[in-house]
């Protein structure tokens, strides 16, 4: 059985957040930060000039809870996947600024992160 890709896991998660907006309206604020992926050199250069920064997490939820200003989620496959050096450097800096930063290994972990963020 083929494991879902990181992209497939993120799609499942985003679809779940859309369904859950009736219970947690703030989920409508969540957005993806499409930093990754293969691009031409010209496109990559333009995006860098526009401010794309390597290591930024995949998703951001600008809803304050539990003393945090918002929640960043970095999606990974349920099995495999590791943080880049840029992510290892940036995540602690985001945390120092008052953001919750979580790494979700798959849709189910991402779902639990959001539930815990809103229900605790």
Image (cartoon, rainbow, N blue to C red):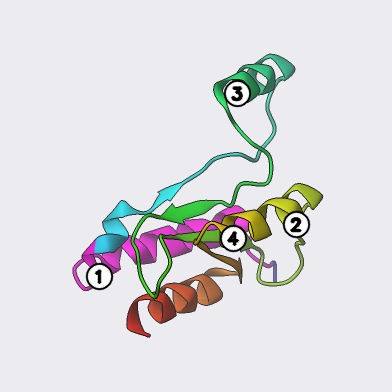
Work out how far the residue at label 3 is from the one at label 4, CA to CA, in angstroms: 26 Å
Check the picture and name the quadrant holding the N terminus.
bottom right
- Per the image, the residue denoted by label 4 is 96
Work out how far the residue at label 2 is from the one at label 1, CA to CA, in angstroms: 30 Å
Query: How many residues crowd around disc 1 within 10 Å: few (fewer than 14), some, or many (20 or more)?
Result: some
Check the picture and name the quadrant holding the C terminus.
bottom left
Residue 80 at x, y = what percent?
77, 67
Q: Is residue 17 magenta?
A: yes
Residue at point 43%, 66% (across, down): 68
Give the SS element for disc 2. helix
Residue 22 at x, y = what percent?
19, 68
| Residue in the foreground of this view, choosing between 91 and 28 | 91
- Which is more foreground, mark 4 or mark 2? 4
Is residue 31 shown above or below 108?
above
Q: Which mark is residue 88?
A: 2
Residue at point 54%, 40% (across, down): 34
71 relative position to 53: left or right: left
Q: Earlier in the sequence, mark 2 or mark 1?
A: 1
Q: Is residue 110 magenta?
A: no
| Residue in the foreground of this view, choosing between 100 and 1 | 100
Q: Main secondary structure of the magenta part?
A: helix
Give the SS element for disc 3. helix
Query: How many residues crowd around disc 3 within 10 Å: few (fewer than 14), some, or many (20 or more)?
Result: some
Q: Earlier in the sequence, mark 1 or mark 4?
A: 1
Q: Quadrant of residue 24?
A: bottom left
Q: Can you see residue 74? A: no
Residue at point 49%, 53% (across, down): 59
Image: magenta residue range: 3-25
Q: Earlier in the sequence, mark 4 or mark 2?
A: 2
């Amino acid at each position: 059985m083929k494991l879902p890709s990181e992209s497939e896991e993120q799609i499942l998660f985003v679809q779940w957040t859309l369904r859950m907006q009736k219970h947690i309206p703030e989920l409508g604020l969540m957005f993806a930060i499409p930093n990754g992926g293969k691009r031409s050199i010209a496109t990559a250069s333009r995006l860098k000039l526009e401010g794309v920064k390597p290591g930024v997490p995949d998703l951001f939820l600008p809803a304050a809870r539990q003393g945090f200003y918002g929640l960043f989620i970095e999606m990974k496959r349920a099995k495999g996947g590791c943080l880049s050096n840029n992510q290892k450097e940036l995540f602690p800096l985001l945390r120092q600024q008052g953001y919750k930063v979580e790494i979700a290994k798959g849709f189910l972990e991402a779902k639990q992160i959001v539930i815990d963020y809103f229900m605790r």
